[in-house]
Amino acid sequence: MRRGPSRLATLRAAREFLDDSIAMPKCELCELRDYTQRYADFVHPFKFTILDCDSCDTPMAVLGDHRAVPTDDERAFMIEALSLVARAKYGVDKFGIDDVMRQIPDHCHMHARPIRRWQY
């Protein structure tokens, strides 16, 4: 006569415990909480969002997938959509696209930064 949980049940419980306790760190750009201005959510031709960065308060485009490198077509489309928002916010030729991913280098995003008067 068998007593206690089966070996399979014990293994399942151990796996659930490990999955919960060894969670991967969450990516802020995957979560994209709604506490800054959100300009657009695209689902076609691919998923990405344009919103204000919570660190620098400039418009940024964030790829919907957690990966660092977009395709050439994705990058071009994101830049064009982000530029539309930046033109409305800063004016024509008053911004630059910054695609250096400093704080979160493993999730593709780019900022539209204003060009300050002393820069031109």
Image (cartoon, rainbow, N blue to C red):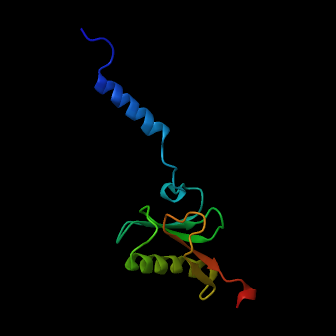
Quick one: 1 or 49, which is closer to the camera? Answer: 1
Quick one: 25 or 46, which is closer to the camera? Answer: 25
Residue displayed at 47% across by 81% down:
80
Q: Considering the image in quadrants, where does the C terminus appear?
A: bottom right
In the rendered structure, the answer to whether residue 118 lies left or right of residue 102 reads right
Toward which corner of the image does residue 72 lie, by quadrant?
Answer: bottom left
- Number of labels in the image equals 0
In the rendered structure, the answer to whether residue 9 lies left or right of residue 17 reads left
Residue displayed at 38% across by 28% down:
13
Q: Can residue 41 be seen?
A: no
In the rendered structure, the answer to whether residue 39 lies left or right of residue 94 reads left
> Please, which residue is most extreme toward the left here?
1
Q: Considering the image in quadrants, where does the N terminus appear?
A: top left
Quick one: 34 or 118, which is closer to the camera? Answer: 118
Q: Can residue 49 be seen?
A: yes
- x, y percentage for residue 20? 46, 37
In the rendered view, would you say 50 is above or below 17?
A: below
Toward which corner of the image does residue 5 lie, by quadrant?
Answer: top left
In the rendered structure, the answer to whether residue 115 lies left or right of residue 51 reads right
Residue displayed at 34% across by 30% down:
12
- x, y percentage for residue 16? 40, 34
> Please, which residue is most extreme toward the bottom here?
120
